[in-house]
Image: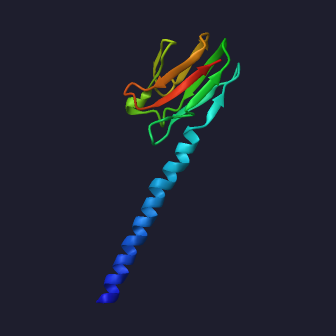
């Protein structure tokens, strides 16, 4: 009877360890990706998606003033309340849908601008230099 109890406890501990690694290990990897800073050059586009933490990936986009910004929003990860991309200071408010997922504007004002979703969960920033 003691051997069965020990085996059960061991199985529970192993299951918890694997579950913890899966949840926290994956989350850690994704968060490091979301903190990546991306420089966007004229004529290029950037893909914007969502990390499980609720942050945008990439979390920061840098452009030179006068650059035409083209953001391709990932319709598979930007869903629910995350399906609206808002950028303060540029009058950008775009509801993302399959086939209608491109956000374009000219970054003609310098500064740091907040990017977020309609629920305020998705977050990031646009830096115009």
Which residue is at the front of the view, 1 or 110? 110
Q: Is residue 55 above or below residue 8?
A: above
Count of numbered circles in the view: 0
Relative to 67, 18 lies left or right: left
Q: Quadrant of the N terminus?
A: bottom left
Relative to 49, 44 lies left or right: right
Relative to 73, 129 lies left or right: right
The image quadrant that residue 84 belongs to is: top left
The image quadrant that residue 83 belongs to is: top left
Q: State the residue at coordinates (52%, 32%).
A: 74
- Outermost residue to the right: 42
- Outermost residue to the left: 1
Q: State the residue at coordinates (41%, 68%).
A: 15
Which residue is at the front of the view, 89 or 42? 89
Residue 6 place in picture, x, y as percent: 35, 83
Q: State the residue at coordinates (55%, 38%).
A: 34
Q: Is residue 81 above or below residue 9?
A: above
Residue 8 place in picture, x, y as percent: 34, 78
Which residue is at the front of the view, 82 or 55? 55
Chosen colour scheme: rainbow
Residue 95 place in picture, x, y as percent: 44, 22
Q: State the residue at coordinates (35%, 77%).
A: 9
Q: Is residue 16 above or below residue 30?
A: below
Q: Quadrant of the C terminus?
A: top right
């Amino acid at each position: 009877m003691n051997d069965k109890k020990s085996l059960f406890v061991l199985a529970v501990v192993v299951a918890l360890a694997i579950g913890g690694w899966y949840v926290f290990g994956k989350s850690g990897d994704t968060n490091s990706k979301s903190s990546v800073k991306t420089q966007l050059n004229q004529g290029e586009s950037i893909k914007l998606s969502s990390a499980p933490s609720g942050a945008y990936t990439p979390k920061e986009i840098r452009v030179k003033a006068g650059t035409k910004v083209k953001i391709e929003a990932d319709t598979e990860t930007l869903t629910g309340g995350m399906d609206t991309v808002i950028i303060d200071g540029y009058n950008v408010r775009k509801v993302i849908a399959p086939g209608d997922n491109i956000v374009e504007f000219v970054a003609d004002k310098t500064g740091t601008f907040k990017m977020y979703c309609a629920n305020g969960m998705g977050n990031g920033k646009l830096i115009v230099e």
